[in-house]
Image (cartoon, grey):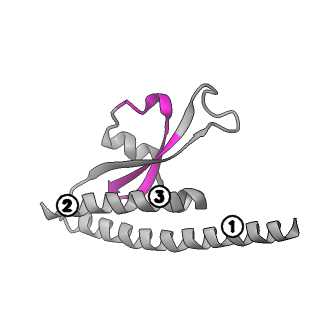
Amino acid sequence: MNEFIRYKDGWGFQMYHLAELAEAHVEKMNVMIRRLHAAGLVRRTAMLGGIIDVAPYTNDHGDESTNQATQAVLLVPEGLGVIFRDTEEMHAKLSYADMRRLFTPIGEINALLRLSYLPCATVLLAQFEDLIGE
């Protein structure tokens, strides 16, 4: 049992470390996004990415019959982050103002979600590159 605990704790530390590294690269991209916007090279934009997590509500938040989805987003000028939405409302179209209100920066979500975010960040950044290349 002690071997399992050491393995689990080591894995958790490694996961946390990788999430911190990913967050550092994401922040570099966020700085670039803000600079491009400040220079007038890209307008305010919102791009929704993939769903990175769906989980039941906790601590008496939300309706027990539904779940909360975590969705990747790229907002200009804010940068890369996520929005949390009720799964029952996933079909509803969001305005730019809605996305800004719901926006949570990557640094403010837990390590596991940050790791899950990386594949979505790659897709969002490719779409952003296409946008600024137009």
Residue 103 in magenta? no
Residue 84 in magenta? yes
Q: Residue at x 19, y 58 (%)?
A: 131
Mark nearer the viewer, 2 or 1: 1
Q: CA distance from mark 2 to mark 1?
A: 36 Å
User: Is disc 3 placed on a helix, strand or loop?
Assistant: helix
Q: Residue at x 45, y 44 (%)?
A: 102
Q: Which residue is mark 3?
A: 117
Does label 2 or label 1 sit earlier along the sequence?
1
Does label 3 or label 1 sit earlier along the sequence?
1
- For the view shown, which residue lies furthest in the right direction? 1
- The kind of residue tagged 1 is Gly
Magenta: main secondary structure? strand
Q: Residue at x 18, y 62 (%)?
A: 132
The answer to whether the residues at label 2 and label 3 have Cβ atoms under 8 Å apart is no
Q: Position of residue 1 (x, y in %)?
A: 87, 65
User: Is disc 1 placed on a helix, strand or loop?
Assistant: helix
Q: Which mark is residue 12?
A: 1
The quarter of the rendered structure image containing the C terminus is: bottom left
Q: Which residue is mark 2?
A: 130
Residues rendered magenta in the picture:
69-92
- The kind of residue tagged 3 is Tyr
Q: Position of residue 95 (x, y in %)?
A: 32, 38
Does label 2 or label 3 sit earlier along the sequence?
3
Q: CA distance from mark 2 to mark 3?
A: 20 Å
Q: Position of residue 112 (x, y in %)?
A: 59, 59
Dot 3: within a 10 Å radius of its alpha carbon, few (fewer than 14), some, or many (20 or more) residues? many
User: How many numbered tags mark residues here?
Assistant: 3
Q: Is residue 20 above or below residue 89?
A: below
Whether residue 67 sits left or right of residue 46 in the image: it is: right
Whether residue 103 sits left or right of residue 64 in the image: it is: left
